[in-house]
Image (cartoon, rainbow, N blue to C red):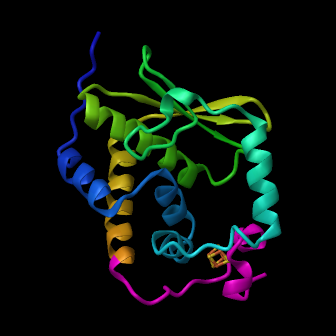
Amino acid sequence: MKMFFQWPQATAFGERVERLGLHGLHFQHVGLCERRAWMYLHSVNFAHWNERVQIGTARHSTSHLRDHSVAGLFGLAPDRIDWVAKIVYESKGTAGAVDAVSDQTAFYAVMLSIASGETWRAVTTILSNRRQREVPLTPERLERLWQASERLEALAAQSKVPKAKRIALCESCSLASFCGYG
Ligand code: SF4
């Protein structure tokens, strides 16, 4: 049975995503650290010369095979899509940062729901323990995504690097040396 997707902000959300060129990682970053999200929005990253990131990227790209059917999907980049069951999967190495990671996975399902008019399911796959975590598109999750999109719009328009406190994530963040939190 078809489950039609109904969300009053759907059109405005989709337009904002398109206008700002947002994708899943923006929604993960803004849930973790606004400075990190700002860097990502403004294309500031140290990946090319940060050894830790290069190793992490290599590990991630070889730890699982990305589903080729997702290539070119209007800027989205989930790890796997089940087009028949209407489920989108995002893989993560560990089970941490549940809310931010769930926002990223939910973002893909929301965008596919907006595009198709039918409600998609979102599932995060945890590679380290081979478990799966469903992310229901509840009103609360949709509201989190809406608010995150508003923050991302504000950060995109901001020319100054936002203030940021040291948090646990700084230990492994590729921007730590820039922030002085390394
Ligand atoms: S080092 Fe910490 S404060 Fe700086 S961008 Fe990374 S997570 Fe944010």
Q: Is residue 93 above or below residue 55?
A: above
Name the residue: 60% across, 49% down: 98
Tell me: 130 left or right of 25. Answer: right
Tell me: 1 left or right of 49. Answer: left
Quarter occupied by residue 94: top right
Q: Position of residue 31 (x, y in %)?
A: 51, 62
Q: Is residue 74 above or below residue 53?
A: above
Q: Nearer the viewer, residue 154 or 137?
A: 154
Quarter occupied by residue 21: bottom left
Name the residue: 35% across, 39% down: 110
Asked if the magenta segment contains residue 79, the reply would be no
Tell me: 148 left or right of 181. Answer: left
Name the residue: 23% across, 24% down: 4
Q: Quick one: quadrant of the N terminus?
A: top left
Name the residue: 39% across, 76% down: 155
- The magenta span reads 157-182
